[in-house]
């Protein structure tokens, strides 16, 4: 993110000087400015009304108890504290964190291994086939995926337990036990999203110069050694971007647990965003929903910040 | 081919390593194939099961290849839910969001890239900052603003807030910055207006960038679940993902092939994008933050 920002601002000045040729005067800078604002109007007004005002509204609302019907009542930090005091809210935040750690680790690990395998010598048609295949789940809706995955993981009739039965494993109560349900949510999420990290890794691997590998080969480095001593360090900028993006999207997980389990059994698969939805639009606790949303946003920003700070120490830029 | 002649002197060394290389190639292929089967398997099962008669839909063994197709479930899904309505709603919502994003992002991106105005850097910074705000954080106030505008439970409630796009604006700005300035300078000397320079010179050159914005918007909003779940109430305004989830809820473990037929039908537009716009979609998704 900040990469893009710095790139953009670094690129701009050089071009600006270009526009500021003497001819600018004759065109009337005021008319040009007006034209700029006309072009910007839909985006700026739209973002003002649907992003900036709502975020301010959320901050204010987070300090009130309000169900739309009766008058809002100021409650101080009570809504924020609910993350600790309210058992459901607390459990769902903990669930979200556990989910993020496991799902992101799996997603990045699988994506990296597959990307490294695709990047090495391989007939081109096979490379295209694998790349398209791993990309495919990304175009589907998480809701649809969760619908058919829910059937596949059905305890009695599901294909997963049938296949496991072939190798002598007794039917697993996937969606009816807390651990099983959490596992299914993670599997379904990773199944759909690893392709995105895979694409990033394929791009990153493609930008590592071949000469470095040749040099390593001459020095007698084996495949595994090359991976850990050449690929991993040179790939670290990509790994950073991929992990930041994976964490941000995993923190917002909603569709899969909503469709697969509705948060159950018990609260075992309830996530932070599910609690935003339930407190706001089922229990009419709009203040609490706003507060949880803000906490989630702060968590997202903090994680992003920490990951970029850590990168200064560990990421190797060429 | 050229490398072969270049590496000729090293041939004995390569020959010695050949068998090892082949084993590792086979190993790699095996792992990649297993991953591909695990990726495509669930989708193949969905397709095959949707093509079984409803009464057999949950019978074992599961079927992964659609031999002996039966289309009863496809007729069934149109009887069970107002499938046409869902498709129309999804198409309208997604189409208008995509078109709106392409136009507004091109306009704003051009202003940021090509016109110097007061507060440009600061405003662009704010636009980029809004990319960091997840949709769940603003949903409560957005819901209230929509109610205030008297748009609650309409398709416009889904469309209007989704049109302004920070990511699209960012993408189009980058795109316009890559188009040479000389074109505009020549046109300005010829006395063309600012609007003509934008509309007739730059916009046609920026269509590939707009296509990326449009395809990304289409892919995201066609599949979107969270906002429609909150912003629409009556079934007449449901979009496809919402309609299918409610159908699944009503069916229990009944004739799941009907639900799966709906799922397969809802995938068709995404498949079209996959086969014809995959390059743009990949380019857009990896251009920055896929939003």
Image (cartoon, coloured by chain):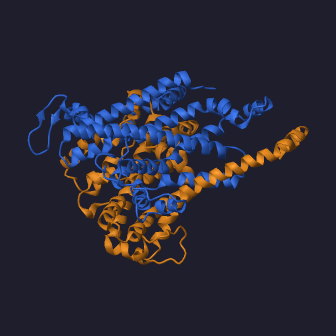
Chain colours: A blue, B orange
Depth check, front residue: A239 or B289: A239
Q: Is residue B25 visible?
A: yes
Q: Quadrant of residue B242?
A: bottom left
Depth check, front residue: A9 or A215: A215
Q: Outermost residue toward the left? A: A70
| Residue at image coords 58%, 52% | B35
Q: Is residue A45 visible?
A: no
Image check: B96 left or right of A166?
left
| Residue at image coords 67%, 54% | A126
> What is the x, y in percent for residue B169?
43, 40
Image check: A42 left or right of B187?
left
Q: Outermost residue toward the top? A: A313
Depth check, front residue: B248 or A293: B248
Q: Quadrant of residue A63?
A: top left
| Residue at image coords 40%, 45% | B104
> What is the x, y in percent for residue B284?
51, 45
Image check: A79 left or right of A129?
left
Image quarter in which the C terminus of chain B is found? top left
Work out whether A247 lies above or below B255: above
> What is the x, y in percent for residue B8?
89, 41
Count of numbered tags: 0
């Amino acid at each position: 993110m900040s990469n893009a920002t710095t790139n953009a601002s670094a690129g701009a000045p050089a071009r600006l000087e270009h526009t500021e040729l003497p001819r600018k005067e004759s065109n009337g800078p005021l008319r040009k400015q007006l034209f700029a604002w006309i072009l910007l109007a839909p985006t700026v007004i739209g973002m003002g009304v649907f992003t900036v005002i709502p975020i301010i509204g959320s901050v204010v609302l987070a300090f009130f108890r309000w169900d739309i019907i009766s008058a809002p009542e100021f409650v101080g930090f009570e809504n924020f504290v609910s993350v600790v005091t309210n058992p459901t809210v607390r459990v769902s935040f903990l669930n979200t964190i556990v989910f993020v750690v496991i799902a992101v680790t799996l997603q990045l690990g699988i994506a990296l291994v597959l990307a490294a395998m695709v990047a090495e010598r391989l007939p081109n048609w096979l490379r295209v086939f694998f790349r398209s295949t791993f990309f495919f789940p990304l175009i589907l809706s998480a809701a649809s995926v969760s619908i058919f995955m829910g059937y596949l993981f059905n305890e009695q009739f599901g294909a997963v337990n049938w296949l496991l039965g072939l190798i002598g494993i007794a039917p697993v109560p996937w969606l009816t036990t807390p651990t099983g349900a959490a596992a299914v949510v993670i599997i379904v999420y990773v199944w759909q999203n690893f392709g995105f990290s895979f694409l990033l890794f394929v791009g990153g691997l493609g930008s590592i110069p071949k000469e470095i590998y040749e040099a390593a080969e001459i020095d007698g480095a084996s495949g595994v050694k090359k991976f850990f001593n050449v690929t991993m360090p040179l790939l670290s900028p990509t790994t950073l971007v991929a992990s930041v993006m994976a964490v941000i999207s995993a923190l917002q997980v909603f569709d899969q647990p909503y469709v697969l389990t509705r948060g159950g059994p018990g609260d075992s698969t309830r996530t932070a965003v599910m609690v935003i939805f339930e407190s706001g639009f089922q229990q009419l606790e709009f203040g609490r929903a706003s507060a949880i949303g803000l906490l989630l946003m702060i968590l997202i920003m903090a994680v992003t910040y920490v990951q970029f700070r850590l990168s200064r120490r560990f990421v190797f830029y060429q | 081919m050229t490398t072969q002649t270049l590496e000729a002197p090293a041939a004995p060394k390569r020959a010695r390593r050949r068998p090892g290389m082949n084993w590792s190639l086979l190993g790699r292929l095996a792992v990649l194939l297993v991953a591909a089967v695990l990726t495509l398997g669930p989708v193949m099962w969905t397709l095959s099961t949707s093509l079984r008669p409803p009464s057999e839909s949950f019978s074992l063994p599961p079927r992964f290849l659609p031999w002996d197709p039966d289309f009863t479930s496809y007729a069934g899904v149109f009887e069970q839910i107002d499938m046409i309505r869902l498709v129309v709603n999804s198409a309208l919502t997604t189409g208008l969001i995509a078109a709106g994003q392409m136009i507004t992002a091109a306009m704003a991106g051009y202003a940021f890239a090509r016109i110097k105005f007061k507060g440009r850097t600061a405003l662009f910074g704010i636009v980029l900052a809004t990319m960091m705000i997840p949709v769940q954080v603003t949903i409560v106030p957005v819901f209230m603003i929509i109610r205030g505008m008297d748009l609650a439970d309409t398709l416009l409630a889904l469309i209007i807030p989704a049109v302004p796009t920070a990511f699209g604006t960012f993408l189009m700005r980058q795109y316009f910055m890559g188009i040479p300035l000389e074109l505009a300078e020549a046109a300005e000397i010829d006395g063309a207006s600012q609007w003509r320079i934008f509309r007739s010179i730059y916009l046609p050159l920026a269509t590939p960038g707009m296509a990326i914005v449009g395809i990304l918007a289409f892919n995201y909003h066609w599949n979107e679940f969270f906002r429609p779940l909150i912003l629409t109430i009556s079934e007449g305004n449901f979009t496809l993902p919402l309609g299918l989830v409610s159908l699944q809820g009503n069916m229990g473990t009944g004739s799941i092939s009907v639900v799966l037929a709906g799922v397969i039908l809802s995938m068709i537009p995404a498949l079209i994008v996959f086969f014809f716009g995959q390059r743009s979609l990949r380019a857009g998704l990896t251009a920055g933050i896929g939003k």
